[in-house]
Amino acid sequence: MSAAAADWLPAADVTAAGRPVLTAGEVERHLVAQGDVEPEESPRLGPLRARLLVLTSHRLIFLHEPSRSARALPLAAVVHAYPPHRKHGHNPLRSIFSSSSSSSSHHPRVRLQISLPPSRSEVVAVVVSKGEADVFYGRLLEAVRARAWEVVAAVAAAPAGGSSAAQGAPAEEDLAITMPVVGVSGILRMEQEAWESAGQNLQDAFQDLNALMSKAKEMMELAEKMRQKLLTNSSAQSNSNDEEMGSKQDMQDWLLSVGIVSPVTKETAGALYHQQLSRQLADYIRTPLEKAGGMMALVDVYCLYNRARGTELISPEDLLQACSLWEKFDVPVMLRKFDSGVKVIQTKTHSDDEVFARISSLAQKEDSLQKGISPSDAAFTLGIAPALAKEHLLNAESIGILCRDVSPDGLRFYINLFNEIDPQNMYMPKTHGVYHTWISVTAASQ
């Protein structure tokens, strides 16, 4: 990106998976796989080439996926948007001799008149493919006319006690004359007032379903802010007592279950649906993976992710395709398949050696040397599901750490004592090591 381009467009944050970081109240409206931004009047403005265009309710984001850098044009700066058209003055003879770099002149251009600081007006063109131009222009007009950024700003600027009663003005209830409850007529009047109050509350709550959904989105956005604040402060406040840290952990668990504010959908992403779904899933699953020890079963991820998406549910096929795309992206998570066929999602920093060390330590305890360990025992020690614990035990067996015993009592694993036997001195008793400990435990139990 040129220095000129960096001057007129502010930078936008990008997640570890390569998706734009949305601000409070901001939701995605439309995505375009590839587009250019070209200034039409001022040579001081540098163009942007081959960008993923992400139209949100607040901004038009130009994301360069290879470098994971982004620039954003606030929609508040858009003075006017003109319908898509081809570049004026197109000469067929000149196009024969033109270089391939000018091929964008053949694509429809959505011209934007924008206002840039301090107080100058510029005209830039967003160049997209022919099939995308009309849809992009329509979604852009909708977002500009909705002016969602003003709604968010008004809500943030509103005082906490915005009612007249909070500012010292007498409330309507204070001015009303309270009638005494006397006799049967008073009781009937009180019940009638209660019914009328309940009916009014129900009418206010369900009169406008869109307003109800809007409030739900506001709560999700508030929860996201609180979650980010807790994650930021958790490392700084390491000297807090256990009770305070426990309450913060409970609050963080609750906030994580609230959901995703702007889930990727087929309507907004179009042909980029699975690609963007893959990136959003990689961003979302990082925190649950860390809490689960770095690995989760694919079926658990499916349930957790669909719960976070609310009504925008995805199919198992969509989830599997999104996970399979991680091989093409530089994301910190990966899809793994065990020899038994069980599929899991794990962080790239997850170490099987660390798991094997904990399993070996568990198998060498006195009780385990005598009775062995079951998948449930390993699950309790590792803090994971029994199905995943069984896969780790089978892997430990495959590399010679454990031996398996299948009996009517079920599947159990024991430490591999064959590693302790010296082929040259097979009958010589040892006075140290795991074999000696096993002999001692076995003799004491008899």
Image (tube, rainbow, N blue to C red):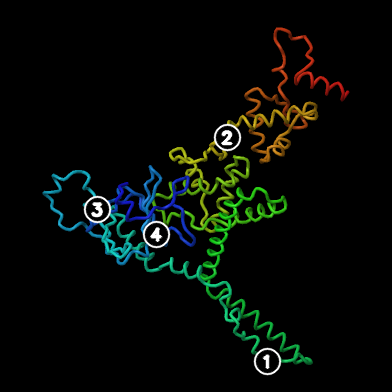
Circle 4 sits in a helix, a strand or a loop, which is it? Answer: strand
Task: Give the quadrant of residue 382.
Answer: top right
Q: Closer to us: mark 2 or mark 1? A: 1
Circle 3 sits in a helix, a strand or a loop, which is it? Answer: loop
Asked if disc 3 and disc 1 are in contact, CB closer than 8 Å, the reply is no
Label 1, residues with CA under 10 Å away: few <14, some 14-19, many ≥20: few
Task: Give the quadrant of residue 8.
Answer: bottom left
Q: Closer to us: mark 4 or mark 2? A: 4
Q: CA distance from mark 1 to mark 4?
A: 52 Å
Q: CA distance from mark 3 to mark 2?
A: 48 Å
- Which quarter of the rendering shows the C terminus? top right
Q: Residue at x 76, y 19 (%)?
A: 435
Q: Which residue is mark 1?
A: 177
Q: Closer to us: mark 3 or mark 1? A: 1
Label 2, residues with CA under 10 Å away: few <14, some 14-19, many ≥20: few
Residue type highlighted by circle 1: Ile
Q: Which residue is mark 4?
A: 59
Residue type highlighted by circle 3: His
Residue type highlighted by circle 4: Arg
Label 3, residues with CA under 10 Å away: few <14, some 14-19, many ≥20: some
Q: CA distance from mark 4 to mark 3?
A: 23 Å
Q: Which residue is mark 3?
A: 107
Q: Is residue 272 left or right of residue 313?
A: left
Label 4, residues with CA under 10 Å away: few <14, some 14-19, many ≥20: many
Q: CA distance from mark 3 to mark 1?
A: 72 Å
